[in-house]
Amino acid sequence: MAVVMIGIDPHKGSHTAVALAAVETRLGQIRVRASAAQVENLRAWAASWTERIWAIEGATGLGRLLAQQLLAAGEQVLDVQPKLAARVRLLNTGTVNKNDPNDARSVAVAAMRSPNIRAVAVEDHASVMKLWVRRHRDLSRTRNRIVCRLHAILCDLVAGGFPKQLSAIQATAVLETIDPIDAVGEARLELAHELLEDLRRVDEQRRAAKRRLAKIVAASGTTVSQVYGAGPVVTATVIGDVGAISRFPTRDHFAAYNGTAPIEASSGNRTIHRLSRRGNRHLNHAIHMAAVSQISHHGTAGRGYYLRKIDQGMAPKSALRALKRKISDSLYARMIADARRAARHLNQGGPGGQTGNDSASSATGSHPEPALRTSHSRTATNSKSSRAYKPSPAPTKARRRTA
């Protein structure tokens, strides 16, 4: 019997499912309420098709709960990106109305035609990391809003306001020196004190979330945290957003996913590569923070690599992008090594060895000095690149001061 593909368009209050045969003929459709019996109702409806696969649009988003419930019931579930289903509707011949049954059919067709549809897996520690990283990110945004409001209030209380980055301790010292002269000034001062209390509360919540992330990262046993600049938040962001590293065949695919690989914008005889704005921006920001941390600390391999690129004629931003690509390659190598170690642990029943972890934790990681592609920078090198490289004396002096 041919496999039946069942596409599901999930919503908050209901789910619409459409079953398609191998030749994309509609076999049936159903709409169930989003309730505790949603899985039982769907399985009872699809009981006549013993060979079936479920394709859910956004199985990591709105359809996460339904996908995990079907997976726990022993069903095979695929995750269809909304963009793929939208392309099916766009390229469909004839007039197709925009409704839930047609959307579910588009999901099923996309799952049948696309060769690289990701299968939904049981949630693990990566999902836990992603959850708490999102919590830390939300708290950080809330803190920024509170600080901006506090700055605005201080501009009305103090001439010139507070020109620097504001912390709870600094805000307390400033507010203690303010003596309002009228009722409006007293109201502004009271509001500033309330904002200060909110800032203290959010700061404590951010610290608690970071401590929780540090425990989760340590319990996972990952080696990603050994990359210089990858603290608990950066490590959890990388692992949480990447999930299974096996879905990236090469480090180039991983770089394209996180936005550190340049995109080609060539025309005619001109070959041009420009900065990529694609990819996972959360992951790109995490890599950016690791690169900035390496550049700002003397004696790190990342800073030395950054200075060498500048001496070769690269602009600072181009050198930073090249360093981010190196960090991306290092992260990929470490996650591949962690995945192989976990596979050996499952197959042999022991910890096993670990590859890719015998080098210093730096931007280069398991690839100490690989050649960098010329397409990694938008800026063409000038005449300095033709001269022999001479080490810059700045890192040596910095290391001497550190010692």
Image (cartoon, rainbow, N blue to C red):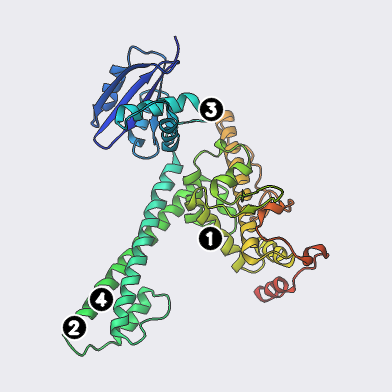
**Could you say which is closer to the camera, residue 40 or residue 54?**
54
Query: Residue 289 has which mark?
Result: 1
User: Distance between the Cα atoms at labels 3 and 2?
Assistant: 66 Å
- Dots 4, 2 in contact, CB < 8 A: no
Dot 4 or dot 3: first in sequence order is: 3
- Pointer 3: what residue? 115
Dot 3 or dot 2: first in sequence order is: 3
Query: Residue 353 has which mark?
Result: none
> Residue 239: x, y in percent?
50, 46
Could you tell me which residue is drawn at 55 percent across and 53 percent down? 225
**Mark closer to the observer (4, 3):** 3
- Pointer 2: what residue? 184
**Residue 229 visible in image:** no
**Could you say which is closer to the camera, residue 4 or residue 89?**
89
> In the picture, residue 41 is in which quadrant?
top left
- Element at badge 3? loop
User: Distance between the Cα atoms at labels 4 and 3?
Assistant: 58 Å
> In the picture, residue 382 is in which quadrant?
bottom right
Dot 1 or dot 2: first in sequence order is: 2
> Residue 130: x, y in percent?
42, 47
